[in-house]
Structures are given as C-alpha cells and as structure tokens.
Image (tube, rainbow, N blue to C red):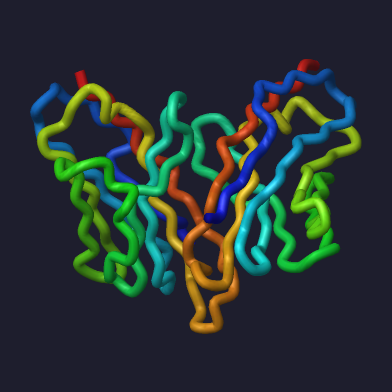
Amino acid sequence: DAGVIQSPRHEVTEMGQEVTLRCKPISGHNSLFWYRQTMMRGLELLIYFNNNVPIDDSGMPEDRFSAKMPNASFSTLKIQPSEPRDSAVYFCASSSSDSGGSFNEQFFGPGTRLTVL
Amino acid sequence: GNSVTQMEGPVTLSEEAFLTINCTYTATGYPSLFWYVQYPGEGLQLLLKATKADDKGSNKGFEATYRKETTSFHLEKGSVQVSDSAVYFCALSTYSSASKIIFGSGTRLSIRP
C-alpha cells in the first residue's frame, strides 16, 4: 500500500493567493483528518470526516479555510486568501473506524510544507 | 474535557542513557492511550498503545504502562540510540470519539553520540 499521499510536498505562495492542498487516504479507510503543525501552536486538528461527511470542523481557524471530501479517495484543504500566518506543515491522516467505537490507528501522510510570503 | 499533558522538551541525552518522557491525561470514561513518534521531515506514526488499565504497550525497545490510578502513561526506554532522535507525542482516544485522537504538545528528543 502506498500510504496516505499528499500533494504538493512544498508550496510557496504570496499573500492573498489561493492555496489548495490535496490528500488521498489509504484505500478502505473511512475517516480522514486534516492537521496543522507549527512551532508555536504544535499539532492542531483542523477538521475530520467520517464516510466523506465532515464531523467536526471546530478547529478550522476561520472562514478563509475550507475542506471537502467529494469521495472516499480524495480530499482538499483550501485557503483563500492565504496569509503569512498560515505558514505551517499541513498533515492529512486516515483511519478505518469500525462501528464498535474501538480505536483504529491513524496513518499520517508526509505533509505539505506551506510558506506564505 | 479530554486532554493530555506531557513534559516539555527538548530532552537531550547521551547514547545508551535511560529515557523517561512523562505523560498524564484527563478523560471522561476509559480512554485508550498512545505514543506517536515523528522523525525529522515525516508525519507521525504510531509507536505503541494500551487500551485498558495496567496494559503495557511496547515497540522498538520503548514501553509505557497504562496507570489508571495516577492517570499516567509515561514512555521509557532502557538504552537510547541516536536513531531515536525525534518528537514524541502522547495521545488518547475515547469510546465516544473513537475516530478522533487528542494529542499532547510533543517532546523533542535529541540523542548525542
């Protein structure tokens, strides 16, 4: 299995531009998570989906951030317009959550390093 | 609410030293507990887990025991190697939110040759 795939791996853009980050979860996984990691704030959960439905988006910092999951094999995180304070590493993770509520391991992608100038 | 508190880093040790990274938690009900590790330039990966009180999780020489009475899950290794240099995250998940994991702030570990 290829694992969780994220693209691009690095993105440099100018303030005000739209940024789209992409994620392909592991085949068969039905939960997908977007995290942001910075030195100042550590690892933050932005949003997560179960069966393509957003379950908790309370971590999304503001309306400039939006996430979609149109199907089980693809998700996007969009920032429009981007600002320098959005510079961070963005991780996507996926897991397979059974109906019994037991824990299933989250598998992380390699991350997208975003720099907003 | 549910939360995880772990010792602040960075932690710097010499090779073959004994490692302890403290972790305590607050949770409603009976959480599952985990340690994740992040190597430089990579995403997080599960290191070990314990799903009930007194369970011991172990992997790659690392161990952690689920202590319900002290609400702790301290990470230990008897003899660290340079390759163990990474950031370590303590985390928990509860039955009511099995998909979601609450992560601690992470502890950066550096091992000197």
Q: Is residue A25 left or right of residue B48?
A: left
* Residue at left offset 26%, top offset 58%: A75
Instruction: Determine whether A39 is above or below A107 in the image.
Output: above
Picture quadrant where residue B76 is located? top right
Q: Residue furthest bottom?
A: A99
Q: Quadrant of residue B90?
A: top right
Q: Is residue A25 above or below residue B59?
A: below
Which one is nearer the viewer's eye here, A23 or A117? Answer: A117
Give residue A23's position: percent from left, percent from top.
31, 53
A25 up-or-down from A10: above or below = below
Q: Give the number of callouts.
A: 0
Q: Closest to the observer: A46 or A71?
A: A46
Residue A13's spot in the image, x, y percent?
17, 25
Which residue is drawn at the image coordinates 36% and 50% (left, top)?
A34
A51 in relation to B10, above or below? below
**B28 sits left or right of B59 in the view:** left
User: Residue B107 at what x, y percent from top left?
Assistant: 64, 31
Quarter in which the C terminus of chain B is drawn: top right
**What residue is drawn where x is 25% and y is 30%?**
A11
Q: Position of residue A91 (x, y in %)?
A: 40, 44
Residue for point 58% across, 66% down: B94
> Which is nearer the eye, B113 or B106?
B106
User: In the displayed structure, does residue B12 sit left or right of residue B29?
Assistant: right
